[in-house]
Amino acid sequence: MSREKVLLFILAAIQFTNIVDFMIMMPIGDILQKTLQIPPGKYGWLVSSYGLAAGLTSFIGVFYLDNLGRKKALLFAYSGFIIGTASSAIIPTTDNQELNYWLFIGTRILTGITGGLLGGLVLSIIGDVIPIERRGKAMAVVTIAFSLASILGVPIALTLVDSFDQNWHIPFYVVSGLSVPIWVMAVSQLPPLNAHLKHRAGDYDRFQTIRQIFATREQRNGLLFMMLLILGQFTVISFLTPYMINNVGLEQKDIKWIYLVGGSCTVISGVFIGRLVDNIGRFRVFTIFAFLSLIPILLNTNLPPVPLWVVLTIAGFYFIFISGRMIPANTIITSLVSPQHRAGFMSLNSAAMSTASGSSAALAGAIVSQVNGRGPISHYNIVGYVAVTATLLSLVLLRRMKKIAIEKRTSENGETEHSESIDSNDLIL
C-alpha cells in the first residue's frame, strides 16, 4: 500500500470514530429524551454541547495550529477525543435524572474541546499533501468515513444499545475502545507532516492567519458558506429519529436501517462524486447536488405515517445528496488558503462548522415541541424550511466565491488558468 493510501486510511479511520461519536447522539435521541426525562429543548442542548465546545476550541486553534507539526497536533487532539468519549461511557447512572443530564453535558463538552480540532486538521493534511487535481478523490475517501459510520458504526451501536436494554453508554465504550489502536497506528505510520513549517518566511505571527482570513473576502465568504451548509443539514438530522418514531410510526429498532441504507448509498456514490468533482469542477457539482438535496429535506420534514420502505427510499437519496454537496464543498474550502496558513484557516472553518452544528440542534429544539416528552413532534416542517433557506443562501455565496476566484486569477495572470482557487472545469456552473 502506498504512503498516500496509508495516510488516507488513517485519516478516514480517525474521521470514522469522530463521526460515530457525534452521530450516535441523533439515533438514540428518543431513548435519551425518555431515559433522562427531558423535553426537545434540553435534548437539543445535549446535542449542541459537543458542537459549541468544538467551535470554541477550534477558534483558539487558529492562533497556534500553524506553528505545530500536523502529526503532533493530530495525535494530541485525538488523545483528548478518546478520553472524552471514554468519560461518556463511564459516567454513573443515578436516580437523579437531572444530575445524569448535566454529567452527560459535561462529558460531551470535554469530548468537543479536543475532538473538534480533528476535522480541520484532517482537511489541512489533505490540502497539504494531496495535489488539487487528485484532491476530489481524497476528499471522497475521507467523506466515505461518514458513510461507513452510517453503515457500520451507527447500526452496530444501535444493535448493542438494544441488546443491553437500551443502555446509551454502550456506543461510547465501543468508540473509545476502537480509537486506541487507530491512535497507535497514527503514531507509527504517519510522517511528521511539517512541510508548512519549512516553507515559512520569517517568525511565526499567531495573529497573521486571523488577520488574513478577515481581510480576504474569499475566505470570509467561505466560512459563512460552510456554516450555512451545516445549518442546512443538522437542523433536520437532529430531530429526525424522534420524528420518525413519534410521527411516522417507526420503532427504535427500525432506525438503524435508515443509517445502514443511507450510508450504503453514499459509499456507492462517494467515489463517483469525487471523480465528478475532479472532472467537471467542484462549483458545478456542488450546485447540482445542493438543489437536489432540497427534495429529501422537504420530504423528511413533512412525512406522514408511511411504510418503512418509503422512509428508506427517501433516506437513501437524502444521504447521497447531502454527501454529494459536502465533497465539493470541502474541496472548495481547502483551496482558499496557502499551506502556511491552512491549519489555522481550517481550524477556524472547523469552529464555524461546529458552532453551526451545535446551534442547529439548539435551533431545531427551540422550534419543535412535544407534550411531556412523548407524542407527536410539532413544527418539524418549519425546521425543513429553515434548512432549505440556508441551502439556497449557500448557493448565493458560492456564486460570489467563484466570481472572486476568477477575478483574482485574471488580475494575477491576465487569464484564467488551473490553480488552487479556480480551474478550467469550474468556468461554467
Image (cartoon, rainbow, N blue to C red):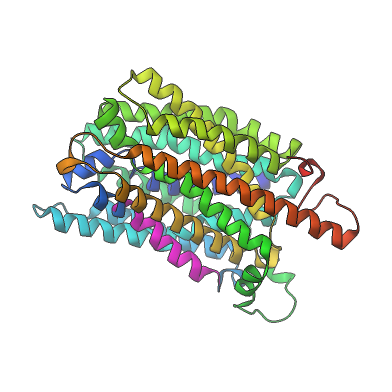
Q: Is residue 177 left or right of residue 219?
A: left
Residue lying furthest bottom: 203
From this view, report whether residue 208 is shown above or below residue 346: below
Residue 125 place in picture, x, y as percent: 62, 56
As drawn, 115 above or below 255: below
| Residue drawn 61% across the image and 40% down it | 140
56 is within the stretch colored magenta: yes
The answer to whether 267 appears left or right of 359 in the picture is right
Q: Position of residue 284 (x, y in %)?
A: 70, 39
* Residue nearest the observer in this picture, 419 or 21: 419
Using the image, determine if residue 12 lies above or below residue 217: above
Quadrant where the image shows the N terminus: top right
Residue numbers of the magenta segment: 46-62
Task: Please tell me whether the stretch drawn in magenta is mainly helix, strand or loop.
Answer: helix
Q: Position of residue 237 (x, y in %)?
A: 39, 40
Residue 314 seen: yes
At horizontal 47% and vertical 53% (from top left) the residue drawn is 183
Of all residues, the one furthest to the right in this rendering is 414
